[in-house]
Amino acid sequence: MNDEIDLTLHLQTLARRQPSAPALLAPGGKPMTFGSLVVRTERIAARLRQWGFERGDVVAWVNGDRAQTAAALAMLPASATISPLSPSSTISTLSAALRRIGPKAIVVPSKGDSVAARAASLLDIAVMTAEGDDAGEAGAFDLVLAAPRGSLDRRSRHSPAWACIGTTSGATGSPKIVSHGHRQVLQTAHSVGERLGLGPGDISGHVMPLHLAGGIRNALFQSLLCGGAVNCLPEAGVDALIRAIAAGEVTYASAAFTMLREMLARLEEGARYDRGRLRFMRVASGRMEPGEMDRLERALGVPVVTGLASSETGTAAQQAPDAPRKRGSVGRPVASEVRLVGAEGRDVGAGEVGEIHVRGPQLFDGYIDDDELNARSFVDGWFRMGDLARFDGDGELHLVGRVKEVINRGGDKIAPLEIDEALKRLPEVLDAAAFGVPHARLGEEVVAAVVMRDGAACDPEAMLTALRASLGASRAPRRLWFVERLPRTDAGKLARSQLPTHVGFVPDEGPAQPADDDRRSPFERALAALWCDALGVPRVDADARFADLGGDEAIASALVARVDAAFGVALAPHALRDEASTVAKMVRAIEERRAGRV
């Protein structure tokens, strides 16, 4: 391998050019230089070779120390394949991942009876510990073989071209096992680093999980492999990041949108802030609304950029901090070919929505233990991201939603992201997410979960009215659930598939009649029958809202025409949104008109 496709050789080249330049920083410690990083890499490599390790053999890393984990990600690929796993995993989750990955050894916390140590004992995996030394450098450690076990005799089962093996965040289902090859890691760092203008002197404020791709390829290697440094701050540490920025110890950060929202709230509440050497902020692991990004730019005094990245594709598109940025865009493709494929299997043009397909040097080699998923995910060398998007006339990419999340309401395909955005524009809403639930006539109906701002007044009917005005009656949610938080993955991504369970949605069990049905008047029963026929549902309770039952403008027009023909009373279609929005209300509205009070 040469240093263009081998990250260890590339780090050695950087060390020869700038041996005393800082590579790793951490609160309370002195910097580890590039020269020291390479010396330590060679020492660790010699030790692993002595124990029988070679590239392709996996060392699982679950020791929990962020600076040591960052150092290990840079050092271990010289002689093995590192697999960082979440230190907060349960023993069942961790054991399942270890069985799938097949490590030769696992690095566990040096003190205490950890979950990782118990999982290693259960699976007969050799145990190592990372012991700090007296140098006091950020992330410095020596490996100690604490418990040799049968796994040391395991033969290599993975490609020597893989620097790292990680898991996905699980936002779209069970976590997947993904490789990060030397080539892919270097390509992401170089191509995105060029778009962001990274180089020696830059310092990444690292607050992302180090076991996920965003923390590995973006927050860590993006700066390090461009000759910059990485400041290993506490995960999601808003206060620590603000302090490091003020101290001039961060020039940019790639941070989860949830954390940046928290930072924005604190800054707007008057938190003390000094921009120091900060050049820009990058939104990761999800989406901030354009208005939020504008406010964050004003609060930070630097550009706020975003992009499109995944564990599988690397960074497929990225905005540049030194160029004009379009609201709602994720930028132009980065060292990747990106095409959008429509429902008919053809590439769509500018302005049309299609599924994102990606190919290029950043693309991963395939899921490690799932041939069936690989067969579904690749089409003639193109990887199907599962995201829906459109290109504008300038070639910038705009996300619309996920293929699996599209709500099919009576044939109208609705991307939940547009509902999310409309909800978050309401001043009383802090966070929100739309999703689909089964509906007897329409197939699916649009509903949403909403997190209100502290102290905000909650008026569901007023909120639904505002949403119908902005989205149209056919695309607005029919029901809102109010929750304290939305379900998210470790990386902060919305777990939309969990929303029905999270809000306690219970599917309709069928046309069971309530006990008070016999107490309905003949007039009310006749009117309810018209509603049932118009809506295509087996029954309608007296207080069930027309909109919640799937009613739209077309159904409203047809229903009021049948009411006029049956009862001789003319109602406007819009009455089904307010004065006649339920059967009970319609009974009163008709009676008032007959009595001449309207």
Image: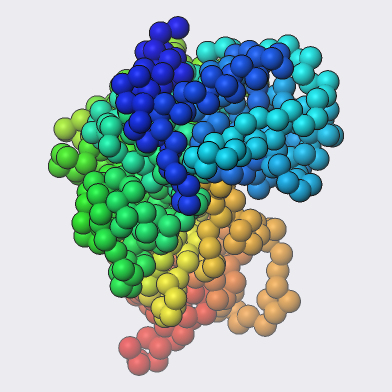
Rendering coords of residue 387 (x, y %): 42, 35
Instruction: Judge from the rendering whether residue 400 lies leftward or rightward of residue 323; answer left or right.
Output: right
Quadrant in which residue 301 is drawn:
bottom left
Residue 521 drawn above or below residue 447: below
Q: Where 166 falls versus 134 (above or below)?
A: above
**Residue 3 visible to the viewer:** yes
User: Residue at the spot x=40%, y=8% of the render?
Assistant: 2
Residue at point 46%, 18% (across, down): 8
Question: In the figure, is residue 17 to the left or right of 505?
Answer: left
* Residue 310, image quadrant: top left
What residue is shown at x 64% (from left), y 62% (from top)? Answer: 504
Q: Residue furthest front?
A: 134
Quarter-wise, where is residue 164 in the image? top right
Of residues 99 and 34, the one nearer the viewer is 34
State the image coordinates of residue 574 (x, y, percent, origin top left): 33, 70
Task: Name the foreground residue: 25 vs 438.
Answer: 25
Q: Position of residue 487 (x, y in %)?
A: 56, 55
On the rendered structure, is 420 left or right of 502? left
